[in-house]
Image (cartoon, coloured by chain):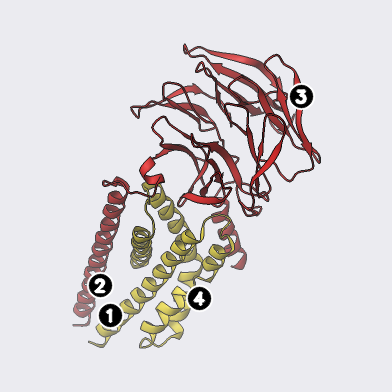
Amino acid sequence: MKKLLVVCCWCLIAFILKAHPGIGIVKDSKGNIYYTDLKQVWKISPDGSKKKVVSGVHTHELYIDPEDNLYGEHLWYNGERIDTWGHYTWCLKNNGDLIKEIEPTEGFLTNYSFVRDSSGNMYWVERFTTSRIMKKNKDGKITKLLEGKFGFIGWLFCTKNGILYFTESDKLHRLLPDGKLETVAMNIGSRSTDFTVMGRNYNSYGIWTDDAENIYVAMLDLRKVLRVGPGGKPETIVASTSSWTICSGIFDDNGNMWVLENSMTNEVRARMISQQELAGGRTADNPIKRAHLLITIFTAVAILGLFIITRTMMSKKKIKRLNFAA
Amino acid sequence: MIHFLSFLLSWLCGMLLILISAFYSYDQFSITDIISFAVFTFAGFLIVFLVVYLLLLRFMNKRLDRTKQFIYFPLIFSTLANLPVYFIIWKNTPELYGPSEANLFTIGFLTSGLIFGLFWAWKNCKQRKTEMS
């Protein structure tokens, strides 16, 4: 019986799947938002309509250039028998044509990245005992920007003018184009355990910035977003509830924050958090709260109904017994 | 049938308490959140119901005097029978969910145990009255 109980409990825990969520959420010059759900890429227009723009691609990152060409990859596993990975990169041109930039190749992407500045320079991390941050110019020349013994370096984020942000252990760093490394904030995260999505790493994930040069960091396992202002003090601005956790984000042209969220069951959604909500204000009409209230009332009514059914059943049994006794 | 009804009633009461608590403690508790809580508490309560509650109910029905059931049933089902669940909730906080969600799960299971105990104490009491009359 004990074994059965343990097995049942573990089944319940195993239901909450481990995942490696994506961070790909980008915006084009017309205000359209693109995001990846690790199976396809979606486009949300400024009028709120949503449509699939690239199907059948497993891409964690996206990049959109100043001409609105969208870039991503497709990564796949070739099975346990040969135990190899394959990839190709694609580009959705601004005229709607989908082309392959790098043809299907074995292994993972090397010397290539979706972290780019407005000039088209690519940046990536080589994570070893001694980690390196590399840069590839538009002409293909690769240079080493930074080298050192770091803790785990998370996703890179690059601003338009080439300033790189990344988290290392529980610190947020800034790498300036001249190679100068600055620590922007300390103690931004706590270590995760093996059961969490991040698994024994500090749980910082996607990074993004706003026009006022505040830096936003998604804390995956803590289910919140930190904002680091010019003073370097991290403050929690959004806390995700229940099974959804924020992985990455971006600001639209109206100052609303769009967040890419991942659920415990590996579903992905993009959600807008309005300026008012971010500022701590509440909108007058809250449909989510109204739906919550309706479901609560419905549950209470269901309980009352069940209780009446039970009472009726018991009374019928009682009459039966009395009749039987008589 | 009565077992199924007691299960459904207890789980729904637990869910109701979760919904009420969330209404006052969260600014946004979306449909997805509600569905997630409903699925997880339903699955968890079903397992505990089948593995612990039914056995304990059978055991206690034989041992406990019916006059004491109104105190002991809710107490035992909300604490002792739910111990594995409380342990799992505690062990996975804050790795799988935040402390506020852990509190909601705890409130849900505590209420379910309480209602389940009260239900069976009430049912036994009614049955006793019928038998006496």
Per the image, the residue denoted by label 1 is: B126
User: Which of the labelled discs sits on residue B80, or is there none?
Assistant: 4
Q: Which residue sits at x=46%, y=62%? A: B105
Per the image, the residue denoted by label 2 is: A314
Label 2: how many residues lie within 10 Å, few (<14), some (14-19) or many (20+)? Answer: some
Question: Which numbered disc, 3 or 2, marks the residue that appears first in the sequence?
Answer: 3
Q: Chain of mark 1?
A: B
Q: Nearer the viewer, residue B56 or B20?
A: B20
Label 1: how many residues lie within 10 Å, few (<14), some (14-19) or many (20+)? Answer: some
Expressed as whole percent of the image width and height from the top left, the position of residue B45 reads: 45, 62
The answer to whether tags 1 and 2 share a subunit is no
Question: Which numbered disc, 4 or 1, marks the residue that appears first in the sequence?
Answer: 4
User: Which of the labelled discs sits on residue A143, or is there none?
Assistant: 3
User: Do residues under tags 1 and 2 come within 8 Å of each other at their CB atoms?
Assistant: yes
Chain A, which colour?
red
Q: Chain of mark 4?
A: B
